[in-house]
Amino acid sequence: MNLFCSKCGAEVAENAKFCPSCGGEMGRGTVGGNKIEGDLEARILDLLRKNEFISAVKLVRENTGMGLKEAADYTRGLAAKNGIVLASSPGSWIVLFIVSSIILAAAGLAVYFAVAG
């Protein structure tokens, strides 16, 4: 059985007080005693490869008792450690589009009034 840092996903010795990779303190904000075994890790990685981040976090929470932020941090770290790029949420693209549109419209108006004025 292995312990993993929830911040970076690095494997941590069972008796370690700090993560050797990122320096995160074991305890609050890390897996800190919640053991992730091979089969569970494989199931989490399978979900991450299918872009099912929320399901992966849920699986971590159900099997470790971690809180939401702790499980999400651990899951992100595990994905990064295994070279899995998590897809951004569709909502972030919508916000980016709206903000970009507003900026372009404001720039267009500024040019219009500069030329017309």
Image (cartoon, helix red, strand yellow):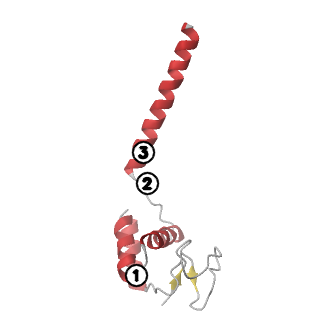
Residue drawn at point x = 48 percent, y = 61 percent: 85
* Label 1 secondary element: loop
Q: Earlier in the sequence, mark 1 or mark 2?
A: 1
Q: To which residue does mark 2 refer?
A: 88
Q: Are marks 1 and 2 in contact (CB under 8 Å)?
A: no
Tell me how far mark 3 sits from mark 2, CA to CA: 8 Å
Tell me how far mark 1 sits from mark 2, CA to CA: 26 Å
Q: To which residue does mark 3 refer?
A: 93
**Tag 1: residue type?**
Gly
**Tag 3: residue type?**
Trp
**x and y percentages locating residue 74 in the rendered image:** 49, 73
Q: Earlier in the sequence, mark 3 or mark 1?
A: 1
- Please determine whether, in this image, residue 52 is positioned above or below residue 93: below
**x and y percentages locating residue 67 in the rendered image:** 43, 74
Q: Is residue 1 left or right of residue 60?
A: right
- Please determine whether, in this image, residue 35 is positioned above or below residue 50: below
Q: To which residue does mark 1 refer?
A: 65
**Tag 2: residue type?**
Ser
Q: Earlier in the sequence, mark 3 or mark 2?
A: 2
For discs 3 and 1, the disc positioned in front in the rendered view: 1
Residue drawn at point x = 40 percent, y = 78 percent: 42
- Please determine whether, in this image, residue 80 is positioned above or below residue 3: above
Q: Within the image, what quadrant is residue 36 found in?
A: bottom left
* Label 3 secondary element: helix
